[in-house]
Image (spheres, helix red, strand yellow):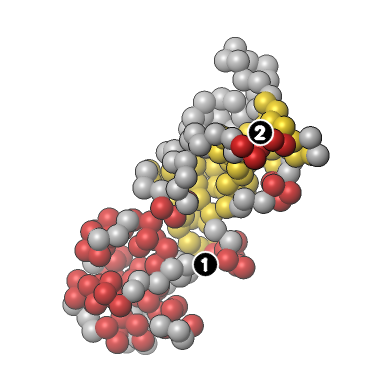
Amino acid sequence: MENEKEKTHIATNLKYLRAINGKSLNDVANICGKSDVAVHYWENGTREPNAVDIAKLSNYFDITVDDLLIKDLRFDNAEFVDINTDTVSIPVLGIIRAGMPIEAQENIIDYVDIPREWTKGGKQFFGLKIKGNSMSPKYASGDTVVFESTEDFEYANNKDSCIMVNGFDATFKKFNINQSGVTLTPLNLENEDGYTTTFYDVEQVKELPVKVIGIARRKISDIE
Protein backbone atom coordinates (compact mmCIF):
# COMPACT_ATOMS: atom_id res chain seq x y z
CA MET A 1 0.00 0.00 0.00
CA GLU A 2 3.00 2.27 0.02
CA ASN A 3 3.07 2.60 -3.75
CA GLU A 4 1.40 5.80 -4.99
CA LYS A 5 0.01 3.98 -8.03
CA GLU A 6 -1.75 1.46 -5.77
CA LYS A 7 -3.18 4.28 -3.70
CA THR A 8 -4.63 5.85 -6.83
CA HIS A 9 -6.20 2.56 -7.94
CA ILE A 10 -7.82 1.71 -4.62
CA ALA A 11 -9.47 5.14 -4.62
CA THR A 12 -10.67 5.17 -8.23
CA ASN A 13 -11.53 1.46 -8.24
CA LEU A 14 -13.73 1.79 -5.18
CA LYS A 15 -15.59 4.78 -6.61
CA TYR A 16 -15.98 2.99 -9.96
CA LEU A 17 -17.20 -0.29 -8.43
CA ARG A 18 -19.69 1.50 -6.23
CA ALA A 19 -21.04 3.48 -9.21
CA ILE A 20 -21.48 0.55 -11.61
CA ASN A 21 -23.10 -1.58 -8.90
CA GLY A 22 -25.49 1.16 -7.83
CA LYS A 23 -24.23 1.20 -4.27
CA SER A 24 -24.32 4.22 -1.97
CA LEU A 25 -21.57 5.40 0.36
CA ASN A 26 -23.70 4.09 3.22
CA ASP A 27 -23.97 0.63 1.61
CA VAL A 28 -20.18 0.31 1.49
CA ALA A 29 -19.72 1.89 4.91
CA ASN A 30 -22.06 -0.68 6.50
CA ILE A 31 -20.09 -3.59 5.00
CA CYS A 32 -16.89 -2.32 6.63
CA GLY A 33 -18.45 -1.00 9.82
CA LYS A 34 -17.27 2.51 9.00
CA SER A 35 -18.92 5.91 8.51
CA ASP A 36 -19.93 7.41 5.16
CA VAL A 37 -17.20 9.98 5.68
CA ALA A 38 -14.52 7.26 5.94
CA VAL A 39 -15.59 5.76 2.60
CA HIS A 40 -15.70 9.23 1.06
CA TYR A 41 -12.08 9.79 2.09
CA TRP A 42 -11.08 6.39 0.67
CA GLU A 43 -12.56 7.39 -2.67
CA ASN A 44 -10.82 10.75 -2.88
CA GLY A 45 -7.46 9.31 -1.80
CA THR A 46 -7.22 11.20 1.49
CA ARG A 47 -7.29 7.98 3.51
CA GLU A 48 -6.78 4.27 2.72
CA PRO A 49 -8.75 1.26 3.99
CA ASN A 50 -6.78 -1.16 6.14
CA ALA A 51 -6.14 -4.80 5.21
CA VAL A 52 -9.32 -6.06 6.89
CA ASP A 53 -11.47 -3.48 5.09
CA ILE A 54 -9.79 -4.28 1.76
CA ALA A 55 -10.69 -7.96 2.21
CA LYS A 56 -14.30 -7.01 2.99
CA LEU A 57 -14.46 -4.74 -0.07
CA SER A 58 -13.04 -7.35 -2.44
CA ASN A 59 -15.53 -9.92 -1.16
CA TYR A 60 -18.43 -7.45 -1.40
CA PHE A 61 -17.67 -6.59 -5.01
CA ASP A 62 -16.65 -10.19 -5.85
CA ILE A 63 -13.16 -9.36 -7.11
CA THR A 64 -9.69 -10.34 -5.94
CA VAL A 65 -7.67 -8.15 -3.62
CA ASP A 66 -4.98 -7.82 -6.31
CA ASP A 67 -7.54 -6.57 -8.84
CA LEU A 68 -8.88 -4.06 -6.33
CA LEU A 69 -5.40 -2.73 -5.56
CA ILE A 70 -3.38 -3.09 -8.74
CA LYS A 71 -5.64 -3.05 -11.80
CA ASP A 72 -7.34 0.07 -13.09
CA LEU A 73 -10.86 -1.34 -13.33
CA ARG A 74 -12.15 1.68 -15.22
CA PHE A 75 -10.65 0.21 -18.42
CA ASP A 76 -12.92 -2.15 -20.32
CA ASN A 77 -11.57 -3.54 -23.61
CA ALA A 78 -9.05 -0.70 -23.62
CA GLU A 79 -11.83 1.87 -23.42
CA PHE A 80 -11.46 4.39 -20.60
CA VAL A 81 -14.53 4.93 -18.45
CA ASP A 82 -14.59 8.54 -17.28
CA ILE A 83 -15.82 8.96 -13.71
CA ASN A 84 -14.77 12.61 -13.54
CA THR A 85 -11.53 12.50 -11.57
CA ASP A 86 -11.16 16.28 -11.92
CA THR A 87 -13.50 16.78 -8.97
CA VAL A 88 -13.87 15.35 -5.50
CA SER A 89 -16.98 15.19 -3.33
CA ILE A 90 -17.01 16.70 0.14
CA PRO A 91 -19.61 16.23 2.87
CA VAL A 92 -22.15 18.94 3.66
CA LEU A 93 -23.02 19.08 7.35
CA GLY A 94 -26.18 20.31 8.98
CA ILE A 95 -24.28 21.16 12.15
CA ILE A 96 -20.75 20.66 13.43
CA ARG A 97 -20.39 18.94 16.78
CA ALA A 98 -17.97 20.49 19.24
CA GLY A 99 -14.82 18.53 19.99
CA MET A 100 -15.07 16.28 16.93
CA PRO A 101 -12.68 16.53 13.95
CA ILE A 102 -14.38 17.28 10.63
CA GLU A 103 -13.75 13.78 9.27
CA ALA A 104 -15.53 12.28 12.29
CA GLN A 105 -18.74 14.31 11.94
CA GLU A 106 -21.72 12.07 11.19
CA ASN A 107 -24.60 14.49 10.49
CA ILE A 108 -24.04 14.54 6.72
CA ILE A 109 -27.00 15.90 4.75
CA ASP A 110 -25.50 16.08 1.26
CA TYR A 111 -22.31 16.03 -0.83
CA VAL A 112 -21.01 18.68 -3.23
CA ASP A 113 -18.17 18.58 -5.75
CA ILE A 114 -15.12 20.82 -5.64
CA PRO A 115 -12.15 21.00 -8.05
CA ARG A 116 -9.58 18.32 -7.20
CA GLU A 117 -6.79 20.89 -7.58
CA TRP A 118 -8.11 22.65 -4.47
CA THR A 119 -6.95 19.67 -2.39
CA LYS A 120 -3.29 19.97 -3.43
CA GLY A 121 -0.91 20.17 -0.51
CA GLY A 122 -3.23 18.10 1.68
CA LYS A 123 -5.90 20.80 2.00
CA GLN A 124 -9.24 19.52 3.24
CA PHE A 125 -12.74 20.95 2.80
CA PHE A 126 -16.23 20.56 4.19
CA GLY A 127 -19.61 22.08 3.44
CA LEU A 128 -22.03 23.64 5.90
CA LYS A 129 -25.73 24.34 5.38
CA ILE A 130 -26.40 27.88 6.57
CA LYS A 131 -29.31 28.53 8.93
CA GLY A 132 -30.41 32.04 9.85
CA ASN A 133 -29.68 35.43 8.32
CA SER A 134 -26.80 36.79 10.37
CA MET A 135 -24.55 36.76 7.27
CA SER A 136 -27.09 38.08 4.76
CA PRO A 137 -27.33 39.43 2.17
CA LYS A 138 -23.98 37.85 1.18
CA TYR A 139 -25.10 34.44 2.48
CA ALA A 140 -28.77 33.51 2.79
CA SER A 141 -30.38 30.91 4.99
CA GLY A 142 -30.36 27.63 3.04
CA ASP A 143 -27.12 28.37 1.18
CA THR A 144 -24.33 25.80 1.28
CA VAL A 145 -20.90 27.26 2.02
CA VAL A 146 -17.72 25.32 1.22
CA PHE A 147 -15.02 25.83 3.86
CA GLU A 148 -11.31 25.14 3.74
CA SER A 149 -10.37 23.46 7.02
CA THR A 150 -7.91 25.47 9.11
CA GLU A 151 -7.20 26.34 12.73
CA ASP A 152 -4.81 29.17 11.81
CA PHE A 153 -6.02 32.50 13.24
CA GLU A 154 -3.75 34.56 10.99
CA TYR A 155 -4.90 32.71 7.88
CA ALA A 156 -8.53 33.32 8.84
CA ASN A 157 -8.01 36.99 9.70
CA ASN A 158 -10.52 39.28 7.98
CA LYS A 159 -12.25 36.31 6.32
CA ASP A 160 -15.75 34.86 6.60
CA SER A 161 -15.04 31.92 8.89
CA CYS A 162 -16.53 28.98 10.72
CA ILE A 163 -15.76 29.34 14.43
CA MET A 164 -16.36 27.25 17.53
CA VAL A 165 -16.95 29.17 20.77
CA ASN A 166 -17.15 27.67 24.25
CA GLY A 167 -17.65 24.14 22.96
CA PHE A 168 -20.94 24.93 21.20
CA ASP A 169 -21.89 24.11 17.62
CA ALA A 170 -20.03 26.13 15.01
CA THR A 171 -21.04 29.68 14.15
CA PHE A 172 -20.41 31.56 10.88
CA LYS A 173 -19.09 35.12 11.16
CA LYS A 174 -16.44 37.45 9.77
CA PHE A 175 -13.30 36.84 11.84
CA ASN A 176 -10.78 39.50 12.87
CA ILE A 177 -7.78 39.21 15.16
CA ASN A 178 -5.47 41.79 16.75
CA GLN A 179 -3.25 42.04 19.81
CA SER A 180 -6.27 42.59 22.08
CA GLY A 181 -8.27 39.56 20.98
CA VAL A 182 -10.70 38.45 18.28
CA THR A 183 -13.90 39.95 16.93
CA LEU A 184 -16.75 38.00 15.35
CA THR A 185 -18.92 40.19 13.14
CA PRO A 186 -22.24 39.30 11.49
CA LEU A 187 -22.66 40.90 8.07
CA ASN A 188 -26.32 41.61 8.81
CA LEU A 189 -26.12 44.38 11.41
CA GLU A 190 -29.34 46.10 10.33
CA ASN A 191 -31.80 43.48 11.51
CA GLU A 192 -34.62 42.69 13.90
CA ASP A 193 -33.02 39.50 15.20
CA GLY A 194 -30.42 41.03 17.50
CA TYR A 195 -27.29 40.09 15.57
CA THR A 196 -24.37 41.90 17.18
CA THR A 197 -20.59 42.03 16.97
CA THR A 198 -18.87 39.98 19.68
CA PHE A 199 -15.38 40.61 21.05
CA TYR A 200 -13.26 38.10 23.00
CA ASP A 201 -10.10 39.24 24.72
CA VAL A 202 -6.90 37.18 24.68
CA GLU A 203 -7.73 35.46 27.96
CA GLN A 204 -11.24 34.52 26.81
CA VAL A 205 -9.92 33.16 23.51
CA LYS A 206 -7.68 30.82 25.50
CA GLU A 207 -10.07 29.83 28.27
CA LEU A 208 -13.42 29.42 26.46
CA PRO A 209 -11.83 28.59 23.98
CA VAL A 210 -12.46 30.35 20.66
CA LYS A 211 -11.33 28.20 17.72
CA VAL A 212 -11.33 28.72 13.96
CA ILE A 213 -12.21 25.54 12.05
CA GLY A 214 -12.56 26.80 8.47
CA ILE A 215 -12.68 29.74 6.06
CA ALA A 216 -15.36 30.24 3.40
CA ARG A 217 -14.25 29.41 -0.16
CA ARG A 218 -17.47 29.05 -2.17
CA LYS A 219 -21.18 29.72 -1.79
CA ILE A 220 -23.79 27.49 -3.40
CA SER A 221 -27.17 29.21 -3.27
CA ASP A 222 -30.24 27.20 -2.44
CA ILE A 223 -32.04 28.70 -5.45
CA GLU A 224 -29.34 27.70 -7.98
Label placed on residue 70: none
Element type at marker 2?
Answer: helix
* Viewer-closest of 9 and 84: 9
Q: Which image quadrant for residue 63?
A: bottom left
Q: Residue at x 57, y 66 (%)?
A: 122
Position of residue 46 measured from the top left corner of the image (x, y, whole percent) = 47, 67
Q: Residues within 10 Å of mark 1 (few under 14, many from 20)?
A: few
Q: Residue at x 25, y 61 (%)?
A: 33
Among all residues in the image, which is located at the extreme right? 179
Mark nearer the N terminus (2 vs 1): 1
Q: Residue at x 38, y 56 (%)?
A: 37
Position of residue 10 measured from the top left corner of the image (x, y, whole percent) = 37, 76
Horizontal relation, residue 179 to residue 186: left or right: right
Q: Residues within 10 Å of mark 2 (few under 14, many from 20)?
A: some
Q: Tell me the quarter of the image containing the N terminus.
A: bottom left
Element type at marker 1?
Answer: loop
Q: Residue at x 35, y 62 (%)?
A: 39
Q: How many marks?
A: 2
Q: Is residue 48 visible?
A: yes
Q: Is residue 90 above or below residue 42?
A: above
Q: Is residue 18 above or below residue 93?
A: below
Horizontal relation, residue 122 to residue 91: left or right: right
Q: CA distance from mark 2 to mark 1?
A: 43 Å
- Residue under label 1: 86
* Viewer-closest of 211 and 219: 211
Q: Is residue 129 visible?
A: no
- Residue under label 2: 204
2 vs 1, front mark: 2
Q: Is residue 208 above or below residue 212?
A: above
- Hey, what amino acid is under mark 2? Gln
* Viewer-closest of 104 and 127: 104
